[in-house]
Amino acid sequence: MNIGRISQVMETYQANNKRQVSQSRGKTGADEVQLSNEAKFYELAKKAAAQIPDVREDRVAAIAKKLEHGKYSVSAAAVAQKVMEGWLF
């Protein structure tokens, strides 16, 4: 077994390793991002949803008008149905 050559092997390895690092540092490239079709669809849906107002003023005004005239009534069954739909979904 010849131990004297280990230092030569280590020097060669270190020299090659330094050369690889310096060569890879010289290469510069721009970062690139690619979006999936699902991500593109999600972004489109998000933009469309942002354009819809949170409060539908026309419906609120119509209900307020009915309330003022005492003509707005909702059945208990309809309220129960909507409550159940909210819990199930």
Image (cartoon, helix red, strand yellow):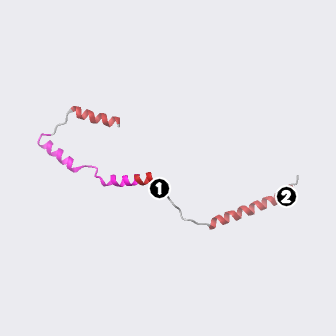
Foreground of the two, 42 or 13: 42
Report the side of 81 relative to 28 (left or right): left
Residue 42 screen position, x and y as percent: 40, 51
Residue 67 at what x, y percent from top left?
15, 42
Measuring from the top left, give residue 23's x and y in whole percent: 66, 66
- Mark 1 residue type: Leu
Could you tell me residue 82's position as x and y percent? 27, 36
Q: What residue appears at the point 14 percent right and 43 percent down from the top-left corner? A: 66
Magenta stretch prevailing secondary structure: helix
Amino acid beneath label 2: Arg
Judging by the rendered image, the residue that carries numbered circle 1 is: 35
Q: Within the image, what quadrant is residue 75 found in?
A: top left
Residue to which mark 2 is pinned: 5
Residue at the far front in the pictured view: 37
Mark 1 residue element: loop
Which comes before the other along the chain, label 2 or label 1?
A: 2
Disc 2 secondary structure class = helix
